[in-house]
């Protein structure tokens, strides 16, 4: 049983050995997963947002309105495909295709489960894995921007162009934060292959804190919490989802980069948006939430939770929760202004990330030291941090000294001052002036000159 | 990937590698030629993107998956994107003019370019003919990424840091050159803004909207003041003032 459990963890050497039909099945599965996720994702989003806004949401087509997206998709396919006169025809045609291809390709390195037996072949539930799989994901997301940017440019009108420009700046800014948070994962896992990262999160590392052995949690979401939070924020920016949906801000740019798009091309943009949302959730699951492994309490009761086809259930569950968070954000937060958005990316996420990586690298480099040396090193670091916090110049102005304090600070022998709360009594010789006049006649202007 | 790595290290060429090369090499060339020939600057950039993507795949084929992916992420994804950003700001109709300012420069450029490419190509071919790739196994023993990291952070750490210092200097220099510093005195505070607003000659209220009549809702139609005059302030300055024509002002004949 133990041997069996150990053998189900795929390693890099397990890939590239499938027969062609198995590869085909896996590719088709990943593709269909993307499409189905879109179909259900749109429905899910509309229902959840409806629930949050106390209205039913789509509930007419099919049971619970499940077929609403399918009906919308069919309707879109039969609509007129409008090509603007000023559009750059070739680029206009290719832009949505680029978006979709890049979004779907990213699914090919996402591990859906451990090794299972498919028609007698013992194979991992993952299309492929390479030694730089996470970089493949990054490459897909950075190439996917081309679809949006080119779509905006090729439409030949102002709002799409503005949307495209915004999207360019947005993606480049948030990709930096995203890449930096993945660096922490690489440093901890020691590998860039997705299956390797999932395997690295299986067991928590033994930490020796003050002589006591502590089993650190395996999930990087807990171990590398700052990276996880920043990564998820950056994925929201990267997928153009609210509150970072500036490239298609309805209140400012009509529909941003897809203003001029109609019919199937518009549908392709919608498809790519939802597929990349699901892909990003899957990537977050893989990198930070333990991938296909069952969450902690389940494995204690049920040893077989991580073998066979069950892991797919955990995987889809985690992805669903993350997609729900995406929808939740959309239902809760208002859209950021563009300058706030950029400031947040460059002045908040990036510095925090850099400092966190520095701290993490420091912690990892003193891992092998003696306990005493380690304590001294951490103590020095903590001391420097405390001193920096203590002596950090405060932005608040010094409060103005009160009158009494000013008086007290006068040098000895100064000219005597009268008491500050001196009430001068009225002189008895001044004549009392009493107003003797008619009451003002409000509302009548007959006396007005 | 692993099998390809092994094969490339041994100096052999696998079938898959050959097929990929012969598909992508013409594409890369087409991209390069298209980049030079495209009239439109954005099209030019897109052709270059194609070439860069092909190059990235070539690196992966040559047992350098890390550098291949970095090529795609950094060069294609970020740097070309910045290029596109600038090109799109220039405007989509900005095409190269075809008037030759130097006579015969095109022919000369073609001859020189082809000659240079021929020289470099034949030189490289003669130099590398029959050379077996050796030693890829050793640096890639712990994995491609780890091998590169070890070299970068031990042997070449000074060059690496120097490059980053150079880049940072360039970035800071660009920022200093482009940054417009406004002194505190030049900035109008609230009181100055308010005084400027109520200064004689400036109407403090919002501008009247353009005329929206039953006959016309064009922004070019000026609004009418209470005394019947047209208000210039109601239309944008770039629009010509357009008075309603007789046909527009006449009754439409919809009432019986």
Image (cartoon, rainbow, N blue to C red):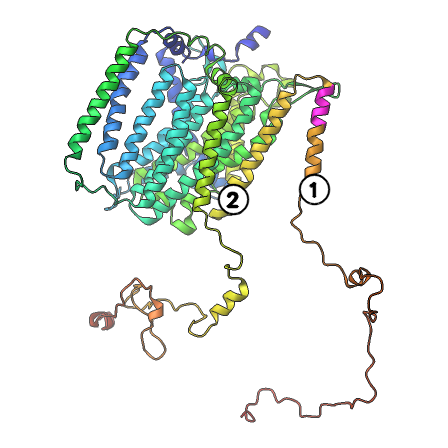
Tell me where residue B19 appears, x and y as whole percent. Answer: 28, 14
| Residue wearing tag 2 | A343
Toward the viewer: A161 or B252? Answer: A161
Apparent side of residue A333 relative to residue B126 in the rendered image (left or right): right
Toward the viewer: A309 or A411? Answer: A411
Q: Kindly indicate the quadrant of the structure image that contains residue A210.
A: top right
Task: Tell me what residue is drawn at x 50 percent, y 59 percent.
Answer: B186
Apparent side of residue B182 relative to residue A225 in the rendered image (left or right): left
Q: What range of the chain is rendered magenta?
A: A372-379
N-terminal-most mark, 1 or 2? 2
Toward the viewer: B121 or B6? Answer: B121
Tell me where residue B126 appears, x and y as whole percent. Answer: 26, 11
- Mark 2 — on which chain does it sit? A
Apparent side of residue A304 relative to residue A279 in the rendered image (left or right): right
Task: Tell me what residue is drawn at x 34 percent, y 26 percent.
Answer: B53
Disc number placed over residue A391 in the picture, else none: 1
Q: Residues within 10 Å of mark 2 (few under 14, many from 20)?
A: few
Against A447, residue A8 (above or below) is: above
Tell me where residue B125 appears, x and y as whole percent. Answer: 26, 13
Against A205, residue B94 (above or below) is: below
Residue A113 makes an appearance in the image: no
Magenta includes A234?
A: no
Q: Kindly indicate the quadrant of the structure image that contains residue B209.
A: bottom left
Q: Kindly indicate the quadrant of the structure image that contains residue A4.
A: top right
Give the total of numbered labels. 2
Disc number placed over residue A25 in the picture, else none: none
Where's the N terminus of chain B, which quadrant?
Answer: top left
Q: Secondary structure at mark 1?
A: helix
**In this rendering, the label closer to the viewer, 1 or 2:** 1
* Residue most extreme to the front: A413
């Amino acid at each position: 049983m133990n041997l069996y459990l150990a053998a189900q963890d795929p390693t890099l050497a397990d890939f590239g050995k499938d027969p062609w039909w198995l590869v085909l099945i896996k590719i088709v599965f990943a593709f269909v997963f993307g499409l189905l996720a879109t179909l259900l994702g749109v429905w899910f989003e509309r229902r959840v947002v409806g629930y949050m806004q106390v209205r039913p949401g789509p509930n007419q087509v099919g049971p619970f309105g499940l077929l609403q997206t399918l009906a919308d998709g069919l309707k879109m396919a039969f609509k007129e495909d409008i090509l603007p006169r000023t559009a750059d025809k070739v680029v206009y045609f290719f832009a949505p295709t680029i978006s979709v291809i890049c979004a779907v390709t990213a699914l090919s390195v996402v591990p859906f489960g451990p090794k299972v037996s498919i028609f007698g072949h013992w194979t991992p539930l993952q299309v492929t894995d390479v030694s730089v799989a996470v970089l493949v994901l990054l490459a897909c997301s950075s190439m996917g921007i081309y679809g949006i940017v080119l779509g905006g440019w090729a439409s030949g009108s102002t709002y799409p162009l503005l949307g495209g420009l915004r999207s360019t700046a947005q993606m480049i800014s948030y990709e930096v934060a995203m890449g930096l948070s993945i660096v922490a994962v690489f440093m901890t896992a020691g590998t860039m292959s997705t299956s390797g990262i999932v395997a690295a999160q299986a067991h928590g590392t033994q930490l020796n804190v003050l002589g006591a052995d502590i089993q650190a949690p395996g999930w990087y979401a807990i171990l590398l919490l700052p990276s996880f939070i920043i990564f998820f924020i950056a994925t929201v920016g990267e997928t153009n989802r609210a509150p970072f949906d500036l490239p298609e801000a309805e209140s400012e740019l009509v529909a941003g980069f897809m203003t001029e798009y109609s019919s199937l091309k518009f549908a392709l943009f919608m498809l790519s948006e939802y597929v990349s949302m699901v892909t990003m959730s899957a990537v977050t699951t893989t990198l930070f939430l333990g991938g296909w492994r069952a969450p902690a309490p389940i494995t204690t009761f049920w040893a077989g939770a991580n073998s066979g086809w069950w892991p797919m259930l955990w995987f889809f569950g985690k992805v669903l929760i993350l997609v729900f968070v995406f929808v939740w954000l959309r239902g809760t937060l208002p859209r950021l202004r563009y300058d706030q958005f950029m400031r947040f990316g460059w002045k908040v996420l990036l510095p925090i990330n850099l400092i966190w990586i520095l701290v993490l690298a420091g912690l990892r480099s003193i891992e092998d030291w003696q306990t005493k040396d380690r304590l001294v090193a951490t103590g020095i670091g903590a001391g420097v941090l405390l001193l920096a916090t203590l002596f950090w110049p405060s932005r608040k102005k010094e409060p103005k000294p009160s009158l009494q304090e000013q008086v007290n600070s006068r040098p000895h022998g100064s000219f005597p001052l009268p008491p500050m709360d001196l009430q001068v009594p009225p002189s008895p010789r001044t004549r009392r002036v009493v107003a003797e006049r008619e009451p003002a006649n409000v509302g009548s202007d007959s006396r007005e000159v | 990937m692993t099998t390809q790595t092994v094969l490339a290290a041994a100096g052999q060429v696998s079938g898959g590698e050959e097929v990929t090369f012969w598909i992508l090499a013409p594409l890369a060339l087409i991209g390069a030629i298209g980049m030079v020939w495209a009239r439109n600057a954005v099209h030019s950039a897109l052709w270059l993107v194609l070439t860069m993507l092909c190059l990235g795949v070539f690196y992966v084929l040559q047992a350098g998956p890390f550098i291949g992916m970095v090529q795609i992420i950094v060069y294609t994804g970020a740097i070309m994107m910045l290029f596109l950003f600038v090109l799109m700001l220039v405007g989509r109709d900005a095409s190269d003019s075809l008037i030759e300012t130097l006579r015969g420069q095109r022919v000369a450029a073609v001859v020189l370019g082809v000659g240079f490419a021929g020289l470099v190509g034949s030189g490289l071919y003669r130099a590398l003919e029959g050379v077996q790739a050796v030693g890829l196994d050793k640096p890639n023993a712990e994995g491609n990424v780890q091998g590169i990291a070890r070299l970068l952070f031990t042997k070449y750490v000074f060059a690496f840091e120097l490059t980053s210092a150079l880049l940072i200097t360039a970035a800071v220099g660009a920022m200093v050159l482009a940054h417009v510093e406004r002194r505190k005195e030049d900035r109008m505070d609230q009181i100055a803004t308010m005084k400027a607003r109520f200064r004689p000659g400036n109407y403090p209220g919002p501008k009247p909207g353009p005329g929206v009549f039953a006959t016309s809702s064009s922004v070019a139609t000026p609004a009418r003041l209470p005394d019947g005059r047209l208000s210039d302030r109601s239309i944008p300055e770039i629009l010509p003032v357009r008075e309603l024509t007789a046909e527009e002002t006449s009754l439409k004949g919809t009432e019986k």
